[in-house]
Image: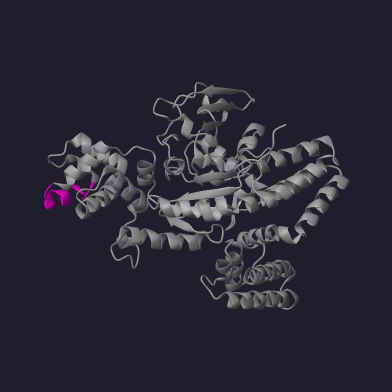
Amino acid sequence: MTTQRTRGPLSDAVARLCAELRGRVGADTANGLHEVLLRLGEPLQLAVVGRIKSGKSTLVNALIGRNVAPTDVGECTRVVTRFRYGTVDRVEVILHDGGKRSLPFNPDGAIPADLGVERERVSHLEAYLTNEVLRDLTVIDTPGLGSTDDSSVARTEAVLGKEAVPGESGTAGGGAAEPDERAESLDPVSRSAVAGAEAVLYVVTQSVRADDQRALSSFGAATGNRPAGPANALAVLNKADTVEPESVRDSDGSVWHAASLLAERQARQLGPRVTDVLPVVGLLAETAETGMFTASDAEALHRLAGLDEATRETLLISADLFTGWECDVPTGTRARLLELLDLYGIGCALEAIAADPDITAGGLRRVLHESSGLSEVSRGLNTVFRARADGIKAAAGLSSMTAVAQRSDDPAERGRIQDGIEALLARPDAHQLRLLEVLTLVSSGEVTLPSDLLDEVLRLGASNNPSERLGMLGGNPDRMIEYAMERANWWRSFASLGSTPAQSRVAHVVHRAYFLLWQQLRSGTRG
């Protein structure tokens, strides 16, 4: 018997409930609960989604630290690929009929461009890697929204949970459906591969579009009908180096500052669907993290740095001038640097060499890493996802259990599962799940709150750090204890006076969260 690896005490509690209920329900419902158990034992499932050509696969490579996800347009970029930890590197092509075939990675370590089977027969790819990053995080790379390839659009929308209504293949008038109306039901094999996504990393570029909002809204169907929100969604502004400083007010001529300001604006647009939007240069991150940057590349940059200032400035005006202008560095060498770093990365490297003429290839790689913004994205993944993986997985597990119950034709079975869930949620140690439920309600707009109260609820549920949850980072411990009780009392009053029934339910949960936080702080002070 294989022991399942659950994520922590909350996931363990949900797993025990599933195991207990399996013996008290029919075969079909028991099988559904078994699937929930299996998912609870797997690493956190992170779907990387966004529009076509937003640089999703480049970012996936950077996060994994290996150049494995194909970034050029080809048949393997049009299917869902799930990157998982394995003891042997291999690719499995999963077919719609349930069959599978194994492929080796290319000699350069990437997924092969030719899958050896017609793409129409392919459900998705499973890529197994001996990679430590994937021990606690399975990364799902998806085709892009907005693709001109209908089947790629459908696969991506299926990953996000968007399903067609049976029999609806077009508009009411019989014409072709608009792009945002196209979708297809997810086949059972694909559902097994991707419906377990519990978190989303959403990749945007300079403009947030209507279908970005729709994608985040529809993500919930892939996670047991839990919408994307501050508890399980983070966004990145990719290709930050392409932001024109002149297009962003108060940027002071700085590309990175302009990108940061734009990311803040996008966070307000997408909020509270996402906890934050972080700027990143995916190309630089991929180059720095996957071993693509070599000692020869560092030497070429040093040669560029040795050119006279006028020539360097001319080269950095445009990509055409960088490769076409006459200078002592061969055109082919410059073309490779442009492919690896683009002009922004080359400029960052030349600045580093000017500050330290003896900087090594390793030192330049570190400069490129920091210039890419990947460090902040990694910190975001750790604080938003990894640190709260137990709660995220447990909440998704409970939602999936509810979905299993709703599919049952037996009212007694449905009641048995719901009673078990309610009993679990009533426990003080499981109140975090109630709070995650509240975050989902307010971030999806199902329950509306005044903006100041909405911000407070989002802050309370967005961290495990008591001072951050109270908005008192580095605050006095005694004052934090007082404030936690003050807010607990305020929300209890709000639940009884001046709130709608829906707001009252939220207020009771928030009151309880503050009260438990007060107890935690008092216990810590006494200890």
Q: Quadrant of residue 67?
A: top left
* Colouring style: one colour
Q: Is residue 297 visible?
A: yes
- Residue 207 spot, x, y in % from top left: 43, 55
Closer-to-camera residue (357/231) = 357
Q: Visible in this render: residue 141?
A: no
Q: Position of residue 313 (x, y in %)?
A: 17, 52
**Which residue is nearer to you in this view: 301 or 53?**
301
Q: Quadrant of the C terminus?
A: bottom right
Residue 325 vertical placement versus 459 (above, below)? above
Please indicate whether residue 71 sits to the left or right of residue 189 in the image: left
Q: Is residue 75 magenta?
A: no
Task: Give coordinates of residue 149: x percent, y percent.
Answer: 49, 36
Relative placement, left or right, of 345 versus 134 is left
Q: Residue 158: which quarter of the image?
A: top right
Depicted 519 relative to depicted 343: above or below: below
| Residue 330, x across and y down, in percent | 17, 36
Q: Is residue 211 left or right of residue 254?
A: right
Q: Residue furthest right?
A: 412
* Chain part drawn in magenta: 307-318
Q: Residue at x 64, y 51 (%)?
A: 390
